[in-house]
Amino acid sequence: MNAHPLRFRSAAAASMLILILAALAACSGTGAAVRQLSVTDSVAEIASRTVIDVRTPAELADGMIAGATNIDFQAPDFRDRVATLDRNGKYLVYCRTGNRSAQAAAVMADLGFTDIVDAGGFAALAAAGAPTVP
């Protein structure tokens, strides 16, 4: 008689499976800290979050989201500067196109931040109605 595919031959095998699933869930925890929202939803989140612009100083000439703080992702002290922020805060991160914002959000999650929105690129946010300043 064939055994049911989900039936375990021993309690040890079942325990091992539970440990593996728990480890996988723990490893995925940092990814859960970062959310990607639609541009419209990201714009709606701006007022309730600390906004971080991770573009270079030269890129700021295009303007920035009103109230944003610039922490250049390419600067050698990026990780150190971000590490001084409240890890329990609510953050929205953006860059020029969305590439560096994803990388910056991943660094923040690695540092223990728990609520990060990767909002993508500045031009898309501005086009969707995000408040900007020159």
Image: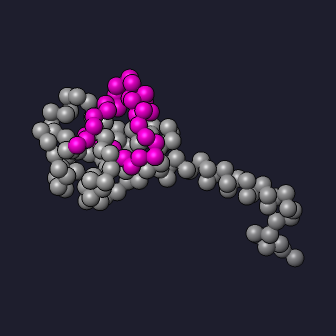
> As displayed, is residue 115 above or below residue 41?
above
Q: Please give the name of the residue rendered at 15% of the width and 33% of the height, measured from the top-left corner.
A: 61
Q: Please give the name of the residue rendered at 20% of the width and 28% of the height, measured from the top-left corner.
A: 58
Decide whether residue 114 is among the magenta residues: no
Q: Please give the name of the residue rendered at 31% of the width and 36% of the height, measured from the top-left corner.
A: 54
Decide whether residue 88 is among the magenta residues: yes
> As displayed, is residue 98 above or below residue 1?
above
Q: Which residues are magenta?
A: 67-96
* Horizontal and vertical percent position of residue 30: 52, 47
* Horizontal and vertical percent position of residue 116: 40, 48
- Rendering colour mode: one colour
Q: How many marks?
A: 0
Residue closer to the observer: 37 or 49: 49
> As displayed, is residue 53 above or below residue 118?
above
What quarter of the picture does the C terminus occupy?
top left
Q: Does the image show residue 39? A: no
